[in-house]
Amino acid sequence: MTTSSRVLSFLVVSCVVASQPALAQLPTPDLSRITPSAGRIGESLKVSLHGSHLEELSELRFTHPGIVAHRVTQPGNEFLPNPRPVGSEFQVTIGDDVPPGIYEARAVCYLGITTARPFVVAPNDSNEVMESGDHSTRDTALEVELNSVISGTVSSRGIDWYRFTAPGGQRVLLEILAERIDSRMDGLLIAYDSDGREVARNRDTYGRDPFLEVSPDQDTEYFLAVSDILYRGGPEHFYRLSISNKPHIDVIDPPMGEPGSTKMYSLYGRNLPGGQPCELLSVDGMPLEKLDVEIALPSEASVPAGYFPGEPRQGLLPGMDYRIGESNAVRIGFATAPVVPEQAEADLQVIGVPSEVAGHFDRAADDDRFRFTARKGVTYCIEVIADRMQSPVDPYLIVHKVTVADDGAETLTQVADNDDMPSFFRVDGKNSINCDTTDAALTLTADHDGDYVVTVVNQFGNGGPENFYRLAIRHPVPDFRLLATYERPLPTNRTGYSVTPLLRQGATAGIRIVAPRQDGFEGDIVITAEGLPPGVSASPLTLSGKTDRGVLVLSAAGDAESWAGEIRIVGRAKAGQHSLVRDARFAALVWGHIFADSIRVRSRLTERIPLAVNGHEQAAVILEPAEKKEWSVEVGQKLELPLKVTDNGTRVGPLTVEPHGLFGLHRGAPTVNVQPDATTATLAINFSPNGNFQVEAGRYQFVLHGTGVTRYRQNVAAVTRAEADLKRISDLITKLKSEAEVSPEATGKLKQAEAAQETARAAVKSATAAAAEKNTSFAVWSDQITVHVKAPAKK
């Protein structure tokens, strides 16, 4: 989708949203940041949690078992006997065996388990500096040493200034880590010399994070200006500024290798140990060094399971992370065919099939062409990987057939092209998590024995060593990848939120499943949930034929107990005689957003798939088909689905029900309103093909999705507990007042009790306000509905 069409979509959406009332939604806990967000190996430090709906925090869990946390509490006393939490603080201890890197943390609280946030573990010798004092001007710049990492936060309309001395003859690298650790900051980094002249600036090298280099001939003092590009700021605009002369890898060539192979790779970067100058390659005017290394790849292709800050489809690309010493990590992909280096000097490179070309756009407007020989009737899959390698390339594929005349003259006829792989964004705009890629792929079945020419175009038009890509021309290798996502699917609000699946007693949660299929694979993919807690179940979801998305429904029993943890979602399929088993990765929104900022929305993978059960609250509604069976309908016919609604007595107004996850239905889903006093209804779905519903014969699985409003009270039990504490202390005060007339010791205790009474009153007030009844929007899903759509009967 082009930028202009996204803007047009937003304008249309804005007109719709403006006329609809905004309602609060059933709360889920969101952890927005951890302060501080980093610690050294072997260190114990105190951290504070920030976010929304974090009441009754009990645990802080990390994805590495060597990082443990304990709640910071005040000891109990005679008047408040239970230990009392200190704000949202935890004492975090990082074990000596925890490798440096980025890990995730989630908190457990009354409502369940929170969203995940990154926590950086630095080497035990890292010079960690916390920003301090006023350094908002060049004159007040904070002085720091080389090889320091500074943790800071930019203020609104503010600039943070630092100064340091770079040794002559050394390459000093300046890098901001912000977006990659879930900061809202879109960083800008500018370096000035001591005379105030700008030396270098950068933004958006690694996503929205800047990176630049200064290389003075002699010892030189530099001033650094750190800001958001739009001078936004606040607590969620935090960053880590690194000033170092450590190794840094810019590019690895080739960027892929065959599983099980051992071969030489060329690293291009700065400060590479043993690296040699490579004047022919530079980035932003800075020449790179070259270092050849031998790397052995594992025999089985896999996707690294650790923290990945990029977009979801980038994180799904099979590969292995590689680093040298204390350098950054680069990912080496697993090739699907023998690797062939691009011949940069060739105008038209002849390659064999199957093969995978390691290519570069060496200069601006550089189109690369490759020629291969095909056999009539044979299918070839042609794929470009660039965006998924985080390369700044937007590839476009063009395929020409070569026809040779009797006199030997050749004619090229275009037979296929592709810009982007299929999008997983819903056309109706009801989802926000990015499961897409701008990479290109197509399938070609040769109609003659002869040659074809494949042209790879970089639509960004840029060139340089970092503009690399992989071009695979291979016979079909049927496969698929698997993503699980979860959003608040309330169509009246048109907003996205960072959210974790949460089941109240009797409730359901629809986990959106996305299964990008590779090389035309059309086998059934059976999706199941494993490791579910007691009282939670999930019927399998089957993605049949070309279906590459659906909804897996998790259901909690009416007596399910509270639980917070991780589950596993698995897809299983058969491709010929091969069994395919793929674990799903969970993709989430990093921040809540409104569609006005949709172009800048960021999604990423999380390390694990979270789930919470709240055994203290009940579902407002249970929605289910009135009959549990498989349905049949012919193409062109209407299917009438009877449904049943069970309320808990708190629903206000109608429940609007529509099909959800019905493959091929893009917009205009049919709906039915179930009134508050009704328990049954019928939803009619017309299976006639049209511009909004691309229906054909096959097996379909989908769910019913309902939205409505309920009268909701949060954590009523907290009010009862707080009132009991207040009554107990008040009764004790009455007793102490009578004793104080004859005992000086009782007088002292009375003052302590009265202070405790004020604390208890504040707790009652806070709990009562949180538990006040509010009209709140909610969503509900039915279990899977299976429909067999048959071809029309022949007349």
Image: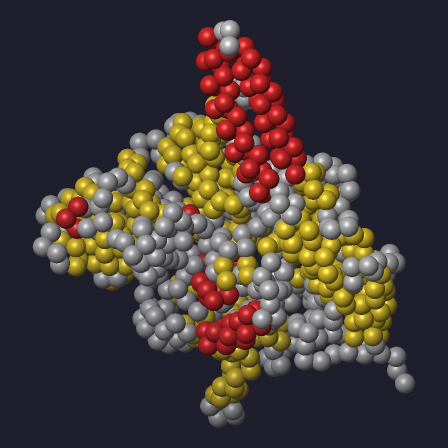
* In the image, farthest residue toward the front: 741
Taking the spot 31% from the left edge, 44% from the top edge, the residue there is 152
Judge whether 656 appears above or below 99 on screen: below
Total of numbered circles in the picture? 0
Location of residue 612 by image quarter: top right
Judge whether 403 appears above or below 453 on screen: below
Position of 17 with respect to 145 (left or right) is right
* Position of residue 55 measured from the top left corner of the image (x, y, whole percent): 55, 38
Judge whether 617 appears above or below 406 on screen: above
Whether residue 57 can be seen here: yes
Taking the spot 49% from the left edge, 53% from the top edge, the residue there is 590
Q: Nearer the viewer, residue 259 or 361?
A: 361
Whether residue 252 can be seen here: no
Taking the spot 72% from the left edge, 57% from the top edge, the residue there is 652
Taking the spot 84% from the left edge, 69% from the top edge, the residue there is 640
* Position of residue 72 measured from the top left corner of the image (x, y, whole percent): 47, 27
Location of residue 684 by image quarter: bottom right
